[in-house]
Image (cartoon, helix red, strand yellow):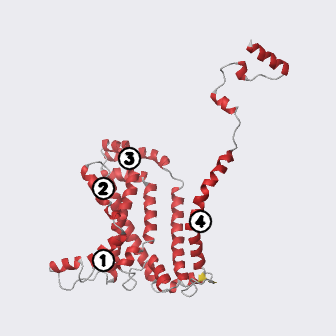
Amino acid sequence: MARQLVHDDAVVSGRKRPEAARRPGSMRAGQALRLRPRRRPGLRKTRAWPFLIPVVLWIILMFGYPVFETVRMALSYVNGTNFTTGGWKFAGLANFRALPSLQGWHLMLRNTVIFLVASIVPQFIIGGLLAVALTEKSRLRRWGRSLVLLPWLFPQVAVATVFLWMFASPAGLFDSLYKSLGLGHSVPYFLQTSNDALIVVILLNIWIGIPFNYLVIQSGLQGIPTNLHEAALIDGAGWWKELTRITIPLLRETLLTVLLLGIMGTLNVFGFVWILTQGGPADATMLPGLLAYTQAFVDFNYGQGAAVILGVVVVLLCIAGMFLLVTRSKSRDERAPRALPALEKTQEASA
């Protein structure tokens, strides 16, 4: 009777009955959802904006404003006289053009290149080898992983103070060992000699940077499927072939990330170098951060100090841009199938 009434009503009104009315129980869940009124796609985005306002304000106050003031300072004549009173006169690019004439500028460039290469390469190699060696689970390896992270447990000020005591002359640790071993009475003055002071700073930076390289590379190793290593082991591939044909190709983005962040961190080094040498002796350990600090807070030439900082920022942005260009077209999902040809090469080499 109910079906007949519905049918008669549809005939009288001239409307076509919906499919659900003609066939009870035939409407699917997807069709039922389509009958509901759709929400506008921009409504949810509009509702989310008020929650982002505090974050945006925090970024503007804590990041945007200091960057703006640094850029304005680099483009103005700012010294100890008008730093607090204001009225900075616009200088254009004069501060940047005056950088090559600064004391220690050329030594700073040479030291930066040596410091980067001599720090990044050992950090990368040692951290990567430790990550590969300590991947498997065992009691000894757990202790090894804990020891690798020790440099991160201590503040840089404390570590720099210990290194200062170790390499100080004539009352340091190595000074006493040098005398006790009877190697001579003329003890080397490590922190007072140009080449030795730079070597000490590089050694300390390597020791501090190894845990970071180890952690990032180890996290990348954990994302590699274990069946690839098991297949290589069954096929008789040695650890070197497994490392170069399976592990490294799958860790390409991770390794590039480690190098990029390592370069950024090394260019921003300041604290422990200032404690050890303050850029000396004779600007032998002068780095960008120390040169900017010296110009701004020792010579009270704030404009040129800000120009040095902006130069470092531009270099870092160029490095980050090259990193994005290299890694944008590559992804882990695209490279994972390439491990199979690598295994085939390993099988042919082992055969």
Q: Residue at position x 22%, y 83% from top?
A: 187
User: In the rendered image, which quarter contains the C terminus?
Assistant: top left
Label for residue 164? 1
**Where is mark 2, residue-wise?**
145
Q: Which residue is mark 4?
A: 60
If you read the primary sequence from the N terminus, does the residue marked by circle 2 or circle 1 appear first?
A: 2
- Determine whether 62 is above or below 345 in the image: below
- The mark nearer the N terminus, 4 or 1, is 4
Check disc 1 and give the amino acid type: Leu
Q: Quarter of the image for the N terminus: give it.
A: top right
Tell me which numbered mark, 1 or 3, is placed earlier along the sequence: 1
Q: Nearer the viewer, residue 142 or 60?
A: 60
| Quadrant of residue 169 within the rendered picture | bottom left
Across and down, in percent, residue 216 comes to 40, 57
Q: Residues within 10 Å of mark 2 (few under 14, many from 20)?
A: some
Q: Left or right: where does residue 140 sit relative to residue 44?
A: left
Q: Nearer the viewer, residue 139 or 136?
A: 139
Pick whichever of labels 3 and 4 is earlier in the sequence: 4
- Give the Cα distance between marks 2 and 3: 33 Å
Going by the numbered disc 2, the residue's amino acid type is: Arg
Amino acid type indicated by mark 3: Lys
Nearer to us: label 2 or label 3: 2
Residue denoted by label 3: 345
Element class at badge 4: helix
